Image (tube, rainbow, N blue to C red):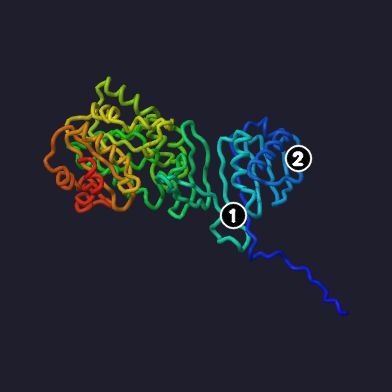
Amino acid sequence: MTTTPVTPTAPDTATFAGRHVLAELRGIDAAVLGDEHRVAEALRRALDAGGATVLDVVAHRFEPQGTTVLALLAESHASVHTYPEASAAFVDVFTCGVQADPEMVVDALGRELDAREVRAQVVARGAGLAPAAGGREVDEPLAAGMRRRWRLDEVLWRGRTDWQDMVVARTAQGVSLFCDGERQSTEATQLVYHEALAVPPMLLADELRSVLVVGSSEGVVSQLAVAAGATRVDHVDIDTECVRRCAELLPYGYTPEELARAEAGDGPVRVHYADGWQFLADAAARGDRWDVVIVDLPDEPVEVTDPAQHARLYGAEFLRRCRDVLAPGGVVCSQAGCPTLWRNDTLGRMTRRFDEVFATVLPYCSDEHEWAYLTGRVDDVDDPVELAASRLDRFPTLASIDADALRRGAVLPFALRASVA
């Protein structure tokens, strides 16, 4: 009998798939980073949280400082290299298959080490994955039973501010901002969003000398106001870190230098890190007045038990607070939800609230974005759409709004017109 020799073959890379996460963890206590046993235990717990199978862990402490921890996994490997003098740890987690989640491991390790900042890049390994697949994702809720998944090709920053979870990442729409799992703005569409929010109220107001912005962490609305001729812009945001991270990482809105000047009150824009609810109450007591008040917040929380701080800034009471600081002929504008049939609850509620507080209400439903906005004036205006259109020359350039867009956007969807009639 003839025996045919068996030639060893390489692994089947056509079906192999893995993810390789390279991460930087910063803002960690130096004493923690200098203790190889604490780092090793933190890595073990993180690997367990991510579903990895740990075969062995080796740790070494260097003199005068720093540690390296290596973990051999059934799925591949993980390593942590610490630099106490920089309050930083550099992490490498590679796993194959679907059981272990290296991104979850990195997130868990950041929590275990109490890292202030986590930056991660995900690399797809093997021919079983498309080059851009396997990246970190944001699973964004849209409506009951509906979600949208964002692929994050590179995470520039991920962390918890004092008020929210925040992610800045590269996506198919460029550098993008996510807060509490919801997309706030993207490089490709942010100007369409911010023009739809800021331009109609700045056209409907009789004067455009002073503007108050509540929220809108990126700073684009402040820039649009100055471009339209405002000489005083007060920007109020409760989340200091979010505003500063946006200036640092987003290619739109404030630059770090512009934000520093605004924080110092050097120029037309002044940034105030404060609760919008209390800021409006204090401003009314002082007798402060603005020609335009713009409220730009994450979408309205709809769950009764939702603890989101900004929920009260959608109510009629807050709209009245905004109304009370208006100069004569002034306006209030708010992001008011989505006009699509399957998620228009917020827009319906906000329409009723604006009708309760203001005599004149101008809607703007963007045809190039998924959001709608409402602008209110205390006095009666016969034709607010044509009045706004007659003032388009206030803006030297616009990318997405003209007179036809204003007229089209001022018509609420049929389902909402029928429900609020």
Which quadrant holds residue 184?
top left
- Quadrant where the image shows the N terminus: bottom right
Answer whether residue 153 is visible to the viewer in this image: yes
- Residue 155 vs 332, above or below: the answer is below
Q: Secondary structure at mark 1?
A: strand
Residue 364 at x, y = what percent?
25, 45
Q: Residues within 10 Å of mark 1 (few under 14, many from 20)?
A: many
Q: Front-most of 251 and 362?
A: 362
- Residue 266 vs 401, above or below: the answer is above
Residue 107 at x, y = what percent?
59, 41
The residue beneath circle 2 is 59
Q: Is residue 398 left or right of residue 106?
A: left
Q: Residues within 10 Å of mark 2 (few under 14, many from 20)?
A: some
- Residue 98 vs 261, above or below: the answer is below
Q: Residue furthest bottom?
A: 1
Residue 399 at x, y = what percent?
29, 53
Determine the residue positioned at 56% across, 60% down.
131
- Residue 83 vs 389, above or below: the answer is above
Label 1 amino acid? Val
Q: Front-most of 390 and 414?
A: 414
Determine the residue positioned at 72% across, 35% down.
65
Answer whether residue 238 is visible to the viewer in this image: no
Q: Closer to the N terminus: mark 2 or mark 1?
A: 2
Q: Secondary structure at mark 2?
A: strand
Tell me whether circle 2 and circle 1 mark residues in contact (CB < 8 Å).
no
Residue 89 at x, y = what percent?
64, 40
The residue beneath circle 1 is 123
- Quadrant where the image shows the C terminus: top left
Label 2 amino acid? Ala
